[in-house]
Image: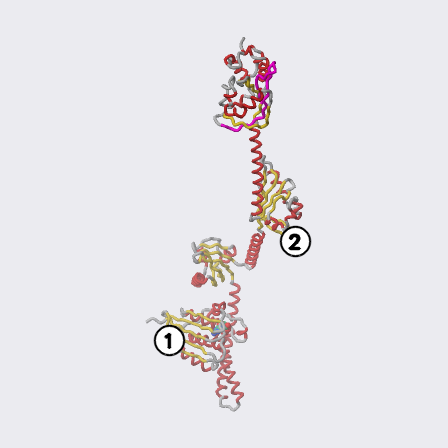
């Protein structure tokens, strides 16, 4: 009979096969036909159950096990364990289990849950856990034949439980970290939990942003804690993040929040981020927000101001331009092109070509000046088809990091109408002055005659009155001449009759003439060497007398007026210094404009038309000279002009 013929050795798949293949007569258990009934029964039960079972038979604890038990033996203990002693197979734990086995042999069953045994079954020692029971297998004679081991390895379960515990700790820690992070974050942060968005974590910043206290919001659904945001679309944003897990980023979103006792419109940049648990399930939303109300308002103000400026520029029909010094290109507005009569182009030279040739110099000088002073201003004619129009350009220079002019931003106005008005006015003034001149000449002659006669008269009133009349007529003549000169100037009828003159002489002459009528001030002239210039004697004389009479007019009685003449850099330079009221910085450059007068309490009672300096400047410029002023309010002014020296 072979092993396979014994019904108690049937079945049991792989281990059954192995058990049947062994010659048991060579083991301490002995030949199969001599196996006691108890071993046969235990073996047949073991082979028919899928649960891990193991028999350790006899004093030697010879092992038999089933397929269910097989994995416990790892990769190194099977198959040799079958049919040999437990003492040998489990040598590394024998000191632990021996006493239990011996106890079972004496009839004491034992069992433990999750019992740890350090097994060496895969080439290394590992901690393995088992739920097991050791029970005695009784022979017919009540003696114990062996140990029946039923065992379930729980190592994996325990590991999983351990992992779960660890991950719970980690979760707790990460939640703590999150809380810490949020409460110390320099931006507003909050965490909302669940589909009602219960406010679970908030920091100080978010409370400030919301205008709420901690108690007002904590553990409340968002729309209960912040009822004012209901109806502002926030619910849609939240529910979208909560249901899809997609991050939402708001840029300058307007939100009305109840802060400081009132509903305030604020602008927020914020992010809603879905919070997911370890199963990837969304359990809440983290919100991070930054208030940008100030920035948005500031930008809106700038935009509004720009819009207003644009409207004003459009309404005033002002053209604008942006000139680039570096590459000589220009960006212009449609109105600019319209005024210039040019199709839009960035080519600067095309615009230049439209300027009247006679005025190109004016424009170039103005640009040169702008380059140095930062301010552009000039008037010029442009040729627009057959038409000639007057334009006025004004601008401001912008400098780069190295303080070099980089751009010039400016405006252009069509002033043709204004110019022709002016011209009509000038024509009229010219005509009237001209007409007045003849009767005035007669009047002057009559008064001078009468004056001469009355000087010897006894009637002191009449002689005084005639003297005064004489002074007034002189003033009037000077004024009328001024107007006439202006209109001559403007129509380019003024003639410069150059001759060699000695400036020192001319100054002496002019000063003594003035001294005849002026007794209120002391005029100091520092004699100088003869200085020769090629100039129009009468016109330069009128410039000198204009500067001196201004010094008289605009300084208190008894003050000194100092006249000097010297050579500076190959130019004759004349200066007239007074100790008068002085001129404000802002007015100084404008003094030489036609009809310009400084408006102040001081000047209000001093008569004048603002043409003296204008005429003087025109005369000096026609001599290729320069005229300018320096002044300090309350201390006095110095007016200068310079003329090129005659070269010999
Ligand atoms: P007018 O004296 O007739 O007003 P001007 O063209 O001679 O015209 O002068 C222009 C303006 O310049 C004056 O109105 C005055 O405000 C100012 N001004 C000229 N000279 C002086 C000076 N020496 N001191 C102070 N202000 C002066």
Q: Is residue 72 above or below residue 522?
A: above
Q: Residues within 10 Å of mark 2 (few under 14, many from 20)?
A: few
Q: Which residue is mark 2?
A: 262
Assess mark 2: CB under 8 A from ligand 1?
no
For marks 1 and 2, give the CA distance: 83 Å
Which dot marks residue 88? Answer: none
Q: Is residue 328 left or right of residue 299?
A: left
Farthest left residue in view: 648
Residue under the point 41% across and 69% down? 625
Residue 387 is inside the magenta segment = no
Residue density around tag 1, few if under 14, some if 14–19, many if 20 or more, within 10 Å: some
**Hey, which quadrant is residue 405 in on the image?**
bottom left
Task: Tell me: is circle 1 under 8 Å from ligand 1.
Answer: no
Which residue is identified by label 1? 501
Sooner in the amino-acid sequence: mark 1 or mark 2: 2
Identify whether 353 is placed above or below 248: below
Does the magenta-highlighted stretch encompass residue 142?
yes
Reply above or below: 506 against 210: below
Q: Quadrant of the N terminus?
A: top right
Percent of width and height locating residue 615: 46, 71
Q: Main secondary structure of the magenta part?
A: strand
**For this rendering, which residue is in front, 134 or 11?**
134
The local secondary structure at tag 2 comes to strand
For this rendering, which residue is in front, 404 or 592?
Answer: 404
Residue visible at 49% across and 88% down?
455
Q: Secondary structure at mark 1?
A: strand
Asked whether the viewer can see residue 236, the reply is yes
Q: As drawn, is 28 to the left or to the right of 284? A: left
Look at the image and give the residue range highlighted in magenta: 125-150
């Amino acid at each position: 009979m072979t092993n396979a013929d014994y019904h108690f050795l049937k079945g049991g798949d792989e281990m059954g096969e192995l058990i049947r293949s062994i010659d048991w007569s060579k083991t301490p258990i002995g030949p199969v036909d001599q196996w006691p009934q108890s071993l046969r029964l235990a073996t047949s039960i073991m082979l028919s159950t899928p649960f891990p079972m193991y028999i350790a038979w006899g004093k030697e604890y010879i092992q038999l096990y089933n397929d269910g038990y097989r994995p416990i033996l790892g990769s190194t203990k099977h198959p040799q364990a079958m049919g040999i002693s437990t003492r040998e197979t489990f040598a590394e734990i024998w000191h632990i289990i021996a006493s239990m086995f011996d106890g079972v042999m004496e009839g004491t069953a034992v069992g433990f849950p999750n019992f740890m045994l350090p097994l060496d079954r895969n080439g290394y020692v590992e901690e393995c856990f088992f739920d097991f029971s050791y029970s005695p297998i009784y022979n017919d004679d009540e003696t114990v034949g062996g140990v029946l081991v039923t065992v379930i390895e729980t190592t994996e379960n325990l590991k999983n439980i351990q992992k779960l515990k660890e991950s719970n700790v980690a979760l707790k820690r990460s939640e703590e970290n999150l809380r810490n992070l949020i409460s110390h974050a320099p931006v507003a942060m909050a965490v909302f939990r669940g589909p009602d968005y219960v406010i679970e974590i908030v920091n100080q910043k978010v409370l400030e942003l919301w205008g709420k206290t901690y108690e007002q919001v904590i553990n409340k659904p968002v729309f209960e804690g912040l009822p004012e945001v209901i109806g502002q679309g926030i619910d849609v944003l939240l529910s979208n993040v909560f249901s899809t897990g997609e991050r939402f980023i708001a840029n300058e979103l307007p939100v009305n929040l109840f802060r400081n006792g009132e509903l305030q419109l604020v602008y927020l940049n914020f992010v809603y981020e879905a919070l997911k648990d370890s199963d990837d399930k969304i359990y809440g939303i983290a919100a991070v927000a930054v208030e940008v109300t100030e920035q948005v308002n500031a930008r809106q103000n700038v935009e509004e101001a720009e819009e207003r400026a644009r409207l004003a520029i459009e309404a005033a029909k002002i053209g604008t331009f942006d000139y680039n010094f570096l590459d000589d290109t220009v960006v212009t507005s449609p109105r600019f092109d319209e005024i210039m009569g040019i199709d839009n182009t960035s080519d600067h030279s095309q615009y230049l070509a439209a300027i009247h040739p006679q005025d190109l110099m004016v424009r170039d000088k103005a640009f040169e000046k702008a380059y140095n002073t930062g301010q552009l201003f000039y008037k010029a004619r442009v040729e627009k088809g057959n038409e000639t129009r007057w334009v006025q350009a004004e601008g401001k220079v912008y400098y780069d990091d190295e303080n070099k002019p980089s751009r010039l931003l400016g405006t252009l106005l069509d002033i043709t109408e204004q110019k022709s008005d002016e011209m009509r006015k000038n024509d009229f003034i010219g005509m009237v002055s001209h007409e007045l001149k003849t009767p005035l000449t007669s009047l002057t002659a009559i008064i001078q005659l009468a004056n001469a006669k009355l000087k010897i008269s006894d009637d002191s009133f009449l002689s005084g009155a005639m003297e005064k009349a004489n002074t007034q007529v002189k003033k009037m003549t000077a004024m009328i001449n001024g107007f006439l000169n202006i209109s001559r100037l403007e129509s380019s009828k003024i003639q410069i009759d150059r001759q060699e003159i000695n400036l020192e002489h001319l100054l002496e002459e002019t000063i003594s003439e003035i001294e005849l009528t002026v007794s209120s001030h002391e005029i100091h002239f520092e004699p100088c060497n003869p200085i020769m210039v090629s100039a129009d004697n009468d016109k330069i004389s009128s410039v000198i007398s204009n500067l001196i009479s201004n010094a008289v007019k605009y300084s208190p009685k008894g003050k000194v007026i100092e006249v000097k003449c010297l050579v500076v850099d190959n130019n004759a330079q004349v200066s007239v210094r007074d100790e008068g009221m002085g001129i404000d910085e802002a007015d100084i450059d404008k003094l030489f404009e036609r009809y310009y007068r400084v408006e102040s309490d001081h000047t209000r009672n001093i008569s004048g038309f603002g043409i003296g300096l204008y005429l003087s400047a025109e005369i000096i410029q026609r001599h290729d000279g320069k005229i300018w002023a320096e002044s300090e309010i309350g201390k006095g002014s110095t007016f200068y002009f310079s003329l090129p020296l005659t070269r010999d």
